[in-house]
């Protein structure tokens, strides 16, 4: 049988560079398990090691429509054989459903935005007619701000639907959500690895809009190589000014609540996003379980996000290797 390694399960090599660098730097053996084709022989045991799911809810936008089920199959196969799985099948279910995220967050005592769930675009306009304005639409299975639009009225949404410019959600589920301007024009993302907060990041909504993915690859047009102006941005992108910066202070007790939430749902690696309102509300609205990191923040941070992940996975792998040797 082959030696145990960390199996990094994902479908987007463009996002993997910082992790590959840390695996090499820390000497942690790994393999990239790409969810872009192939299959499984269920009569064979899964290769030994630690299985780390980095499945992305936006995979279908890269032509990987079947990656979700591929990932579920690999994780189920590994878990059934007793392999150590990080961010397993239950976490994947949260990653691909904002409805599940919001209901789980609320059940844990965290305040979330006022939200209505609509099944089928044909029912969207009727639901929007009685929803407070302005509002946002969001795709249930999103990522990178996918499907996020701000509307001043139900009539504006009706115009987009009539013109065919409203983006259809891949699973047929749309969220109508209250639009709350963030105080100071920023949102915050809290990065968690292995039961610890690594650091928190502020994102500039004026220039980042609704697409505040920290990875550099998210900010570049793959066809032109030029910076993108994200939907919802009110200021042109200036590549010399960072969208993200370290945040030192968090609302009292929030970090502890996030760590408790993550532990309750088996989430070992994540970035959880919230915004603060002018009237003092703290609204948690997104759980990213395939979290990415921003190079400018990494350069200023006391600890590295990818470095913390690889160190954590390396520790788990050492435990698994001892178990294999003992067996």
Image (spheres, grey):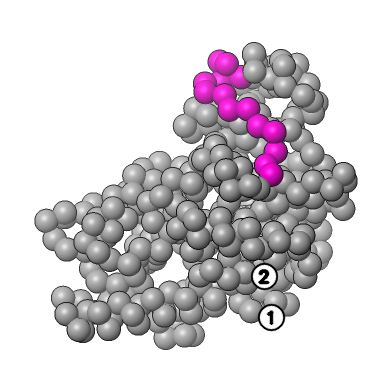
Give 231 or 80, whichever is nearer the viewer: 80
Query: Which residue in the structure is indicated by mark 2?
Result: 199
Q: Residue at x 54, y 76 (%)?
A: 308
Classify 10 Å Cα crowding around label 2: few (below 14), some (14-19), many (20 and above). Answer: many
Question: Which quarter of the figure is the N terminus placed in?
Answer: bottom left
- The part of the chain drawn in magenta is 111-124
Seen in the picture, residue 70 relative to 32 is either above or below; the reply is above
Seen in the picture, residue 298 relative to 275 is either above or below; the reply is below
Query: Which residue in the structure is indicated by mark 1?
Result: 302
Where in the figure is residue 92, as x and y percent of width and height?
43, 50
Q: Quadrant of residue 246?
A: bottom right
**Marks 1 and 2, how far apart at CA:** 8 Å
Seen in the picture, residue 202 relative to 100 is either above or below; the reply is below
Residue 306 in magenta? no
Residue 54 - label: none
- Judge from the rendering whether residue 53 lies leftward or rightward of residue 308; answer left or right: left
Q: Residue at x 56, y 59 (%)?
A: 260
| Residue furthest left as drawn | 43
Q: Residue at x 47, y 32 (%)?
A: 171
Residue 114 in magenta? yes
- Whether residue 295 is visible to the viewer of this picture, yes or no, is no
């Amino acid at each position: 049988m082959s030696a145990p390694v960390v199996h990094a399960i994902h479908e987007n090599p463009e996002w993997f560079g910082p992790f590959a660098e840390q695996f090499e730097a820390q000497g942690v053996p790994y393999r990239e398990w790409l969810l872009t084709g192939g299959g499984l022989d269920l009569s064979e045991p899964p290769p030994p090691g630690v299985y780390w799911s980095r499945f992305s809810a936006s995979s279908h936008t890269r032509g990987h429509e079947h990656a979700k089920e591929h990932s579920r199959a690999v994780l189920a196969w590994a878990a059934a054989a007793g392999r150590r799985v990080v961010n397993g099948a239950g976490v994947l279910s949260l990653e691909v459903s904002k409805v599940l995220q919001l209901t789980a967050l609320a059940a844990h005592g965290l305040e979330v935005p006022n939200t209505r769930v609509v099944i089928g675009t044909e029912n969207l306009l009727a639901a929007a007619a009685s929803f407070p304005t302005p509002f946002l639409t969001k795709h249930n299975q999103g990522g990178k701000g996918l499907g996020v639009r701000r509307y001043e009225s139900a009539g504006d949404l009706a115009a987009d639907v009539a013109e065919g410019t409203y983006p259809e959600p891949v699973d047929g589920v749309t969220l109508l959500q209250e639009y709350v301007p963030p105080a100071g024009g920023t949102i915050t993302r809290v990065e968690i690895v292995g039961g610890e907060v690594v650091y928190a990041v502020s994102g500039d909504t004026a220039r980042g809009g609704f697409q505040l993915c920290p990875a550099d690859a998210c900010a570049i047009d793959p066809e032109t190589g030029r910076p993108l102006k994200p939907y919802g941005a009110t200021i042109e992108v200036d590549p010399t000014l960072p969208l993200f910066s370290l945040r030192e202070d968090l609302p009292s007790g929030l970090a502890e609540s996030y760590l408790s939430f993550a532990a309750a749902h088996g989430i070992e690696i994540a970035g959880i996003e919230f915004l603060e309102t002018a009237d003092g509300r703290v609204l948690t609205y997104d759980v990213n379980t395939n979290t990415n990191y921003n190079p400018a923040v990494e350069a200023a941070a006391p600890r590295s996000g990818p470095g913390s992940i690889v160190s954590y996975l390396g520790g788990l792998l050492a435990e698994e290797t001892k178990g294999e040797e003992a067996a």
